[in-house]
Amino acid sequence: MKAAAAAYPLDFLTSWAQYEDKIYTWVREAAGKGAELLVFPEYGAMELATLAGKDVAADLEASLFAVSDRLADADALHVRLAEEFSVHILAASGPAATRARPVNRARLFAPGDRHGVQDKQIMTRFERDVWRVQGGGPLQVFDTALGKIGVLICYDAEFPLLGRALAECDYILVPSCTEALTGYWRVRIGAMARALENQCVTIMSSLVGEAAWSDAVDVTTGAGGVFGPPDTGFPSDGVLAVGETGRPGWTFAEIDPTRIAHVRADGVVLNKTHWTEQTGRDAGATIVQLR
């Protein structure tokens, strides 16, 4: 199975047709190179706010609802593309106004008009304190023709227990939006750690570039990447593929699902199996004085 992780730049859109053409072009390129699983980044849907005009796109509060109003149309587009190109697509996440406050929602599409949604669990300081985006529905494992897929949106990938909730997944998708290299590396290290712990493959996508029309996503830094456990059947550093930082485009990686099953059953170490041996050791270490 070939996966494609996007390093995706935002555009100021002048028409819905421009957005359709953009997404179509990205999906066609990845599918044309044999990718079956395409991962777009966190808050990549924010460019939909520009369809409501510059003033709305620049307004933190108004932009949330402008994007939410367009998600149904975006979803219909992704349904068509998943069917036309016979691919699974994690669409770029965006605010969905389904509760008292919007949630940050990613949507997974598969051929045959099959789809599901995954909301971000834990908000960053900007999301909770300034933007007032809130956590949404619980984590889910999607059973697909490619294998079991889970989604940890950006900051969520930095929390081991969220990753453990997806321990049965073959692939954990990590759409991200990070302003600086420090943020990119926090999420990347988290993605690599989740691959280590669960002995699975994580696929990280990133927003890249500048979007001066929005205070929320004005500068973003990152790269696409695909990571596995540094163990039997995988690269010694766990990196299956990684893109050039800040450069838009797809990063591709060939993934053999039998290697995931093998490393879980007979790896040099068995992190996924041995996780439960931590039970009873999470109450905190005892403080002692050196003697």
Image (cartoon, rainbow, N blue to C red):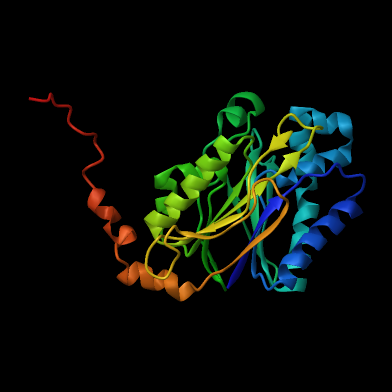
* Residue 107 to residue 146: above or below: above
Residue furthest left in the image:
291
Indicate the position of residue 65 as horizontal and vertical percent values: 76, 36
Taking the image as shown, residue 131 lies to the left or right of residue 277, namely right
* Residue 222 to residue 20: above or below: above
Indicate the position of residue 24 as horizontal and vertical percent values: 81, 62
Taking the image as shown, residue 92 lies to the left or right of residue 125, namely right
Residue in view at x 78 percent, y 44 percent: 10
Residue in view at x 81 percent, y 39 percent: 49
Taking the image as shown, residue 66 lies to the left or right of residue 232, namely right
**Depth order, front residue of 176/162:** 176
* Residue 23 to residue 123: above or below: below
Residue 215 image-quadrant placement:
top right
Indicate the position of residue 86 as horizontal and vertical percent values: 70, 74
Q: Quadrant of the N terminus?
A: bottom right
Is residue 137 in view? yes
* Residue 217 to residue 153: above or below: above
Residue in view at x 72 percent, y 66 percent: 30
Taking the image as shown, residue 128 lies to the left or right of residue 79, namely left
Q: Quadrant of the C terminus?
A: top left
